[in-house]
Image (cartoon, coloured by chain):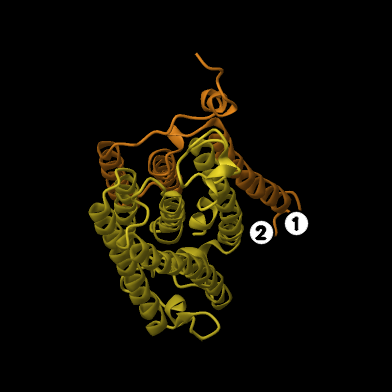
Amino acid sequence: MDSQVIATQPTSAHGEHGHSPHLRHHFATVAQQREAASFGMWLFLLTEIMFFGGMFTAYLIYRNWYYPAFVAGSHWMIMWAGTLNTTVLICSSFTMAMGVYSAEMRNRKALLRYLFITLCFGIVFLGIKAYEWHDEWEHHHVPGLNFSINDFTHVDQRYPQDKPLAPDMAEKTQAYFSLYFMLTGVHALHMLVGVSILVVLLFHAWRGAYTTGHMTTIENFGLYWHFVDIVWIFLFPLLYLISRHQ
Amino acid sequence: MTEPTRHDQLDLEPTLYEHHVVSPKVYLGVFGALLCFTALTVAASYLELGVFNAVVAIAIAVTKAVLVILFFMHIRYSSRLLKLTVASGIFTFLVLITLTLSDYISRAWGLW
C-alpha cells in the first residue's frame, strides 16, 4: 500500500513521458506493472499449492493404507453442512469476482457492496465450520484432545450396513480425523486471514481507494480468495463424498 | 511526425497483453455452472458406483477448479507468462504426487 510514496516522485524524473500517477517508476507501462503484480501473486499461490499439496498427498497415502478406518471416519461428516459450505464459498467467489469488476468500472458503491457480501459469506462459512468442529468434539472425534474409538467399534444406526471395525483399525480413524482437522483447520486459517484482509480492504475502499484506476490490491486479493475456494472444492469431495458407499 | 519514444515502443511490444475486462454475464454463467456441478457431485455421491465414486467426484472437482482458474482468476484472458506459471504449479504438484506414490508402491510390497 506504499503506492502513494512511489507515485509522489518529482515529475521531472519522468522526462518526456507523462503517465498515470499509479505507475511506479521502474515499470515502463501500466500493463507491464499489472502483469508483474499478477505474476508475483501467482508465484505465492504456487507455494500455497505445494503447501496444501503435501497434506493432500498424505491424505491419499493414509487413505490407501487404512482404508476401512477412513471410510468409517468420513461417514461421520455432516453432509448438509459440507454442501452448504461449498455453496457459500462458491457464492463468495462470485461476489468477489464482481467486486473486482466493480473496481475496474470505478464504481465505489458496488465495490463496497460486493466486498461486504463476500465478507459475510466468509464469516458464515467459518460459523458453519465451527458448528461441525463442535459436533465432532461432542462425539469424541478429536484425536489427542477428546477421542474415543467407541463410535467405530459399534454399528451406527445411520450406517447399519457398516461392519464394526476391529479395535486396532478403529484406532486408525485418528489418522483420518488428524488429517481432517489439519486440512480444514489450515483452510479455515486461510479464510480467517482472508476475512481480516477484507475488513481492511473495505475500510480503504470506503475512503475511496481502488476505484481510481489502481486496483492491484483488489485483484490480487481476489486471486487469493479464489484460491482458498479451490482448496475447499477439493477438500469437500475428499473428506465428505468419496467414501459414502464403501 | 515525431520519432516514437522508447515509451511508445514498449506500448507496442506484442508480449504485453491487452487488459481484458471480464463481463458480469461470464461471471454469472460460471457461477451457475459451479452450483450445478456442486449439486451433481453431491447427487453422484449417493449413487453406488464402486471405485467410480471417487473418480467422478475428483473429475467434477477438477472441472470446477479449472472454471474458477480460467474465468474468476482471469487466466483465460491472461498472458502466456501467467498461463505457463499456473501450468507449472499444477505440474509441480503432479510431480509431488507421482514421485511420492511411486516410492510407496515400489517398496515394501504387500505391506500397505
Chain A representation colour = yellow
Placement of the C terminus of chain A among the 4 image quadrants: bottom left
Chain B representation colour = orange
Residue B108 image label: 1
Q: Where in the figure is residue A106, as x and y percent of width and height?
A: 30, 46
> Which chain hosts label 2?
B
Left or right: residue A207 compared with residue A71: left
Amino acid type of the residue that numbered disc 1 sits on in the rendered structure: Ala
The residue furthest right is: B107
Q: Out of A149 and A191, give the one closest to the viewer.
A: A191
Q: How many marks?
A: 2
Left or right: residue A128 compared with residue A27: left
Residue picked out by circle 2: B112
The answer to whether the residues at label 2 and label 1 have Cβ atoms under 8 Å apart is: yes
Amino acid type of the residue that numbered disc 2 sits on in the rendered structure: Trp
Q: Where in the figure is residue A160, as x and y percent of width and height?
A: 34, 69
